[in-house]
Image: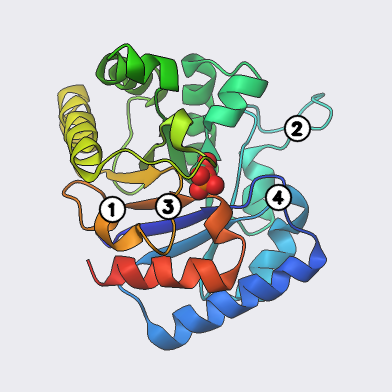
Amino acid sequence: MKPLIAGNWKMNGLTPALADVETVAEIVSTSLPNADVLICPPATLVHRAVQTAAGRIAIGGQDCRPEPSGAFTGDISAEMLRDAGATAVIVGHSERRQYHGETNALVAAKARAAWRAGLLSIICIGETGDERTRGQHLEVCKDQLAGSVPEGANADNTAIAYEPVWAIGTGKTPTIAEIGAIHAHIRQCLTRLGTARTAIRILYGGSVKPSNAREILATPEVGGALVGGASLTAADFHPIIAAASAK
Ligand code: 13P
């Protein structure tokens, strides 16, 4: 499978940011990188981003609620994202786990909702800085995978994003050897969970930049990247897409 380069805009982006969607889409349609490219803007921009992208790149959501509809003020269902033209959704991002108290069970329910609506679910896992210091990162990731990746996950409906919490928005990243080791571990865990899960792409996320993308993406078992800050402008996001296609 091609690497997946996904941008998570988080709570950033007003109407003028659609110009960056247009620039990225245009570059992708002319340079035809060997990568699947996805931008996940805030929900308010999803539909317009889909119109702007016009099929040249994919557009996704950043979260969904498990139920298809109902009395859940302020929430968005996977069906609504699909209706807006999204083809993917991020679930279980560490910021959701931290600020909204999302549990593994809830994240698994969201992943199932994504599949029900025909969306690719990008399931996020990753240890905190304290857990890494205590040497618990392997165990934490194993537990998060076991709890948040539902049965039925396969390479077509799911990607895993390994995002060490301490590397998000900090400019710090694990070493290449550390990224290789944890990705190999995640692959092993997925294989143990069932054969359908063996080919699932494992993305790395956390301070991916144009300057480190090539090395990170060349690491065995790194099947793409989930990019925050550096996905906000086409100027930064494009070199990361180009680095993936050099893989
Ligand atoms: P940064 O790339 O800004 O570190 O964010 C990573 C992230 O959380 C993507 O989901």
Q: Which residue is mark 2?
A: 75
Please state which of the two labelled residues, at mark 4 or mark 1, is closer to the viewer. 1
Q: Which residue is mark 3?
A: 208
CA–CA distance between discs 2 and 1? 35 Å
Residue under the image location 79 percent in, 70 percent down:
16
Residue under the image location 19 percent in, 34 percent down:
187
Residue 51 position in % (x across, y down): 68, 72
Among the two numbered marks 3 and 1 on one chain, the one whose residue lies closer to the N terminus: 3
Relative to 4, is 16 on the left or the right? right
Tell whether circle 3 marks a residue whose Cβ is less than 8 angstroms from ligand 1: yes
On screen, residue 11 above or below 87 = above
Which corner quadrant of the image does residue 177 belong to? top left
Tell whether circle 4 marks a residue whose Cβ is less than 8 angstroms from ligand 1: no
Q: Nearer the viewer, residue 89 or 154?
A: 89
Q: Secondary structure at mark 1?
A: helix
| Residue 118 in view in this figure | no
* Disc 4 residue type (three-letter): Pro
Dot 2 and dot 1 residues touching (CB under 8 Å): no
Task: Say few, some or many: other residues with alpha carbon within 10 Å of mark 1 (under 14 / 14 to 19 / 20 or more).
Answer: many
